[in-house]
Amino acid sequence: MGIIKTFFPSSNSIISVWKIEESIDELREISKENTYIKNEIREMEYHASREALKYGCKKLGIDFIGIKKDSNGKPHLKNNSTEISISHKFPYAIVMIHKDRECGVDIEKIDKKALKVKDKFLIDNEIDYIGESIKNATIYWSIKETLYKIKGKTFDFKKIIIKRPTSKNKYECMINNKNYTIGIDELDKHIIAYTI
């Protein structure tokens, strides 16, 4: 299907969502990139995320040469200081590009899994706030994944503090005394979280 949604959290950033409805062979033909990924779903997500990234770069007037990963596995554009973030949850691949600062994006299916493991990633007042809400547990998980992607290295998710929503779709958060605002969107029973 290709790009189904594009939005601009700021004048210097873009988020592009690709819905995977193509076959693996069609995606290989579209992307023309070789990969050694053995899992077919993962390979499809790989190709779709690269195409969404190319699309976003074009919209922002950035030449896409390719992606490199740093020592933590965080993706970066080759020969460009523009920040990127990539996420996927089949059948969606999503990318965020920001020209001026670090960014993060995540997509998660609203699912009871997040509620089952809430004690592993939430602090007490966050647990109290979400209660037994599957959707709120997924939102909090996605917010913490988004902020994790900014740093690109492993750390305790409980150290990411989520304050209550400041509006319907915005959350103020803190990591190591640094504040972030996270936007939330919903798409076909999936949560999209992204830095603003």
Image (spheres, grey):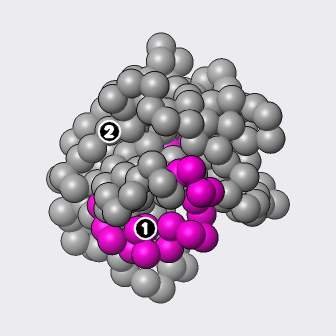
Residue at 72% in and 52% down = 159
Which marked residue is nearer to the observer: mark 2 or mark 1?
Answer: 1
Residue 187 drawn above or below residue 169: below
Residue at 28% in and 73% down = 25
Three-letter amino acid code of the residue under disc 1: Ala
Q: Is residue 103 magenta?
A: yes
**Boundaries of the magenta span:** 102-126
Residue that badge 2 annotates: 185
* Residue 176, visible in the rendered structure: yes
Residue that badge 1 annotates: 114
Tell me how far mark 2 sits from mark 1, CA to CA: 17 Å
Q: Is residue 181 left or right of residue 88?
A: right
Tell me the element at label 2: strand
Q: Is residue 11 left or right of residue 149?
A: left
Three-letter amino acid code of the residue under disc 2: Asp
Residue 63 drawn above or below residue 122: above
Q: Is residue 89 left or right of residue 163?
A: left
Which badge, 2 or 1, comes first in the chain's sequence? 1
Q: Position of residue 31 (x, y in %)?
A: 39, 57
Residue at 21% in and 64% down = 22
Which residue is nearer to you in this view: 156 or 24? Answer: 156
Q: Is residue 64 magenta?
A: no
* Residue 32, visible in the rendered structure: no
Name the outermost residue toward the top: 11
Q: Position of residue 89 (x, y in %)?
A: 37, 63
Q: Are marks 2 and 1 in contact (CB under 8 Å)?
A: no
Name the outermost residue toward the bottom: 38
